[in-house]
Image (cartoon, rainbow, N blue to C red):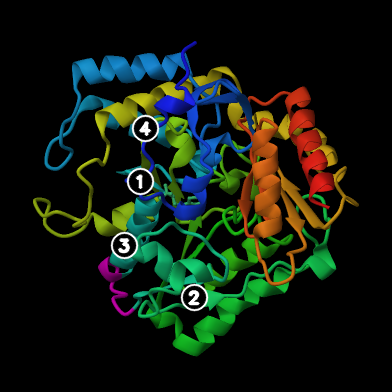
Amino acid sequence: MDHRSKSNAPVLDNFWMPFTANRQFKATPRLLAEAEGMYYTDIDGNKVLDGTAGLWCCNAGHGRKKIVEAVERQLRTLDFAPTFQMGHPVAFDFAAKLAANAPGGAAAGLDRVFFTGSGSESVDTALKIAIAYQRAIGQGTRTRVIGREKGYHGVGFGGISVGGLVNNRRMFPQIPADHMRHTLDIERNGFSKGLPEHGVELAEDLERLVALHGAETIAAVIVEPMSGSAGVILPPKGYLERVRAIADKYGILLIFDEVITGFGRLGTPFATDYFGVTPDLVTTAKGITNGTIPMGAVFASRKVYDGLMVGPENAIELFHGYTYSGHPVACAAGLATMEIYEEEGLLTRAAGLADYWQEALHSLKGLPHVIDIRNIGLVGAIELAPRDGALGTRAYDVFVDCFRKGTLIRVTGDIIALSPPLIVEKDQIDRIVSTLADALKRAA
Ligand code: PMP
């Protein structure tokens, strides 16, 4: 196969890279040229085992023919059509397919689907739906949305207003924040396997914020059932149930941000299924098209949808939408993705690997600088003690080392996050963990 040689490498100046130290990267770039199955190939022809499903999105692995063919067919048939005041069959087909496999199953009733172009757009959409719903049912003073410290809900202005990662917010101090505490408690929960035992009391923060602001000002609370981008923070046992109960008590809608946990990451189709807690709105993206074509979707309960279907029948019920809501090519990619997930049992495959994954990850306990290990489904985190005065540099060095040795991991601060495609085999899990172990030893 032809790979671009170094002399033919791209000019790096112009692409302002997202969430990247541009100057550092451009001095020592890592460029991926191809992908197939569990592997990337870099521009020099080196194979890199994908330990992160791209960016938590390529759940069925790379280069899936079924998706390629569906996209090609759709581009030839109908490349684009609006979904404002008109439509096309593939968007309705995909919405029906998603609805038939919606979070929580039929009983949850989360079968009304609003299409977006990304996770950030899904979050902004869900926040707007929540506030609009409250207004439609005569609760117009409920305009506040509660998020959590360390929450990540994308980078739209709506998403950062409820997000709680300091770096994402600090440039925009004008955006008000109402946050529940949601901190890692390594002292009490360190190296716990699966859900932590301690910390359910953090859910009571919702009561505190209700007391502070008044329930009549609060439209919704948004949480990631499992926080991925903050470095894999798992909900303590009973926590989500408690948040749901408090939200119900005060007429507050509950939004689950399942952009990462949606489509099989935890070993159930959605985290909603894993925890048996039913929210009112669920945001998704990433795995919805196996990462191939940008897309997101918000699942809304019938209660929420019906609440907004009021007023004159010829009036637009929700003034919201994107040019690319229900893009035909994205929907075709999504339909093909769902077929693969079904045929290969990928939405539950992580459940069968979870124990193996857990033991493999926890074998890293005791290696230099490892201060915590966390896991759920096919997600893992290894937290390192930061270097004095140089936060994040230790994990970054491990990331670069692993990449050189042919394994892709992800770092956020000094936390290493792992989330391989759901097609991963046990020997590939071993390889990810042994590459990481060697890199950790070298970092010492
Ligand atoms: N919500 C969550 C929970 C996420 O993890 C992410 C992305 N990692 C987003 C929203 C934003 O998605 P996107 O980058 O597609 O806008």
> Which tag is nearer the camera, tag 3 or tag 2?
3
Q: Residue at x 28, y 14 (%)?
A: 73
Q: Give the distance between the C-alpha atoms of the residues marked 3 and 1, in whole angstroms.
A: 37 Å
Relative height, residue 75 to residue 400 (above, below): above
Q: Earlier in the sequence, mark 1 or mark 4?
A: 1
Circles 4 and 3, Cβ within 8 Å, touching? The answer is: no
Residue 139 covered by magenta stretch: yes
Q: Earlier in the sequence, mark 3 or mark 1?
A: 1
Task: Choose between 119 and 281: the one closer to the eye.
Answer: 119
Q: Where is residue 159 in the image (x, y as percent from the top left)?
A: 40, 62
> Which of the 4 quarters of the picture holds residue 337?
top left
The residue to which callout 4 is attached is 293
Magenta residue span: 135-141
Furthest residue toward right = 366
Circles 1 and 4, Cβ within 8 Å, touching? The answer is: no
Q: Position of residue 146 (x, y in %)?
A: 47, 72
Relative height, residue 255 to residue 265 (above, below): below
Tell me which amino acid carries mark 2: Tyr
Q: Position of residue 429 (x, y in %)?
A: 75, 30
> Mainly helix, strand or loop, the magenta region?
loop
The residue to which callout 3 is attached is 128
Circles 4 and 2, Cβ within 8 Å, touching? The answer is: no
> Which tag is nearer the camera, tag 4 or tag 2?
4
Q: Residue at x 56, y 76 (%)?
A: 206
> Which tag is nearer the camera, tag 1 or tag 4?
1
Tell me which amino acid carries mark 3: Lys
Q: Circle 2 sits in a helix, a strand or a loop, which is it?
A: loop
